[in-house]
Image (cartoon, helix red, strand yellow):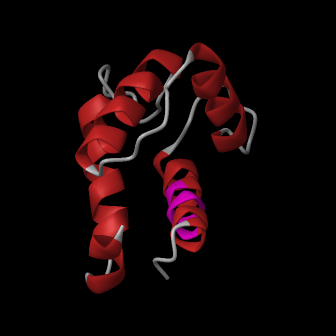
């Protein structure tokens, strides 16, 4: 998490890279299957130890899909990632 505090735009860059990689069909949206793959890779790379259950994926999907389009756009996942990392930083004293 400290990596994102020390590098301007690092979080957006990482999220954009993951989004592009896991948008398997290239339609500019992430579905639930793609979201699971995205979360697994992101959490592994940044050593985030949370279980990625079906319930977690569904709850995350609902939270991310702010416009209720039943798909997640890049901007929605960027906003969520910023909020998530800020919350984790507060919980673990990395602000």
Task: Specify whether 80 is left or right of 74.
Answer: right
Is residue 11 in view from this perspective? yes
* Count of numbered circles on the image: 0
In the picture shown, does residue 56 fall above or below 75? above
Is residue 19 in view from this perspective? no
Residue 94 is situated, as x and y percent measured from the top left of the image, at 46, 77
Task: Specify whether 56 is left or right of 33.
Answer: right
Residue 79 is situated, as x and y percent measured from the top left of the image, at 57, 60
Q: State the residue at coordinates (36%, 81%).
A: 5
Q: Main secondary structure of the magenta part?
A: helix
Q: Is residue 83 magenta?
A: yes
Residue 48 is situated, as x and y percent measured from the top left of the image, at 39, 46
Q: State the residue at coordinates (46%, 48%).
A: 74
What is the magenta range? 81-86
Quadrant of image for the N terminus: bottom left
In the picture shown, does residue 28 fall above or below 79? above
In the picture shown, does residue 50 fall above or below 53? below
Q: State the residue at coordinates (51%, 22%).
A: 31
Residue in front for this viewpoint, 94 or 5? 94
In the displayed orientation, state which residue is furthest to the front: 92
Task: Specify whether 77 is left or right of 23.
Answer: right
Residue 40 is situated, as x and y percent measured from the top left of the image, at 35, 30
Q: Is residue 65 magenta?
A: no
């Amino acid at each position: 998490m400290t990596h994102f505090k020390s590098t301007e735009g690092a979080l957006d860059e990482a999220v954009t890279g993951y989004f592009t990689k896991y948008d398997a069909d290239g339609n500019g949206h992430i579905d639930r299957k793609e979201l699971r793959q995205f979360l697994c890779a992101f959490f592994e790379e940044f050593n985030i130890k949370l279980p990625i259950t079906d319930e977690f994926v569904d709850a995350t999907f609902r939270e991310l899909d702010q416009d209720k389009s039943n798909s997640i756009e890049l901007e929605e996942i960027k906003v969520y990632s910023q909020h998530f990392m800020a919350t984790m930083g507060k919980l673990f004293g990395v602000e």
